[in-house]
């Protein structure tokens, strides 16, 4: 999506350790107009999939996922990161490692809000090694629901999360795929 | 707002300790259609205030705040809860006690995203003792920006956060104010 790629080139900052900082428009200050255009893209990509629920994970995924849920006119569920290892029996839970915080979380969703009739579009802001996204897919599978696909704002194409999930048969739509990044340049995969 | 009050009566659950559980439509599963109607209410309440930025706090405030920012056609900034006591010098920070988690956080916003020219509408899902909201007001004041007011989904009118802030001169617009709640009944303040 050219609009997003241009915004990344204009406002993104590459930090050591392959960190792409986009807190000017995606995950601290949020450019809602841009996110609406991104939600339109996800809608045209998945509008034939009978999606009836959007799933994301707190916190940075919520803004874009809200706008996607608005397009699909369906509810949004956001999974929570639970720091305690105790898991109540009224939730689906999956352990996920966060490289950002270098710790494990239980990612949970109340069983009330994912059902086997649901066709779920998973939305998140970033896809790198895929830990969080695989966790969300796992929660949908635990509920016996269907995964319509995953809509991602920015994928780091040089990490293997996207490849693994596509190889497993999931439809992954990333609006910008960073193929390569250094302090001085950033290139996108042609889509 | 009758639509919200009806939804609280229909789906809310009162738990011991004056907890009002609304995770079926406000802070886990999200009824985006209802939140859009709520955003319209905030817009009509503050449309004359020259608002150019929406501020909320992660995570539950983000969905409603995104829809409000869409109405005002302006950026959204969400403050982050920082568990470490170290505060970088490129952020505004304020310590906030969370009664839900029984611990203190530093609530932070990057100095880049709040400026003295900003007229800020603060949005959150709940107002009870007001700790979080007072923290957000403090961040706006640190930046030398103006507070247009605060838009709250549900206020617990029997706790004093709303009163204290109104007494300090801030315009607080709460779409539903719970005056009293027990296991068996829930009454709203007439507005």
Image (cartoon, coloured by chain):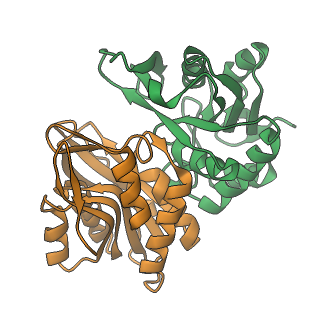
Chain colours: A orange, B green
Choose top left, top right, bottom left or bottom right for residue B172.
top right
Is B125 or B14 nearer to us in this picture?
B125
Q: Is residue A41 left or right of residue B168?
A: left
- In the rendered image, is residue A64 in sight? yes
Q: Residue at x 36, y 59 (%)?
A: A5
> Is residue B140 positioned above or below A76 on the image?
above
> Is residue B124 positioned above or below B165 on the image?
below
Q: Is residue B37 left or right of residue A35?
A: right
Q: Residue at x 62, y 52 (%)?
A: B67
Q: How many marks?
A: 0
Name the spot of residue A50 as percent of width and height, x first.
47, 83
Q: Is residue A132 left or right of residue B35?
A: left
* Residue projecting furthest to the right: B190
Name the spot of residue A2 as percent of width and height, x first.
40, 66
Name the spot of residue A79 as percent of width and height, x first.
37, 53
Is B29 or B105 nearer to us in this picture?
B105
> Is residue B115 positioned above or below A33 on the image?
above
Name the spot of residue A83 as percent of width and height, x first.
27, 37
Q: Residue at x 21, y 36 (%)?
A: A101
- In the rendered image, is residue B59 in sight? no
Rendered-image quadrant of the N terminus of chain A: bottom left
């Amino acid at each position: 999506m050219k609009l997003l790629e241009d915004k990344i080139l204009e406002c993104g900052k590459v930090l050591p350790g392959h960190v792409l900082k986009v807190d000017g428009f995606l995950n601290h200050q949020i450019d809602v107009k841009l996110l609406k255009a991104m939600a339109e893209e996800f809608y045209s990509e998945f509008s034939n999939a009978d999606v009836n629920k959007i799933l994301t994970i707190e916190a940075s995924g919520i803004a874009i996922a809200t706008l996607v849920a608005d397009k699909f006119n369906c509810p949004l569920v956001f999974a929570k990161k639970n720091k305690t290892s105790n898991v109540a029996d009224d939730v689906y839970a999956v352990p996920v490692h966060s490289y950002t915080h270098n710790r494990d979380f239980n990612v949970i969703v109340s069983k009330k809000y994912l059902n086997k009739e649901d066709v779920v579009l998973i939305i998140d802001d970033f896809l790198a090694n895929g830990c969080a996204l695989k966790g969300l897919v796992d929660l949908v599978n635990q509920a016996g629901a269907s995964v319509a696909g995953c809509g991602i704002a920015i994928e780091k194409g040089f990490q293997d999360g996207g490849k693994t999930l596509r190889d497993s048969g999931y439809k992954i739509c990333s609006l910008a795929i960073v193929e390569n990044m250094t302090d001085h340049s950033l290139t996108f995969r042609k889509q």
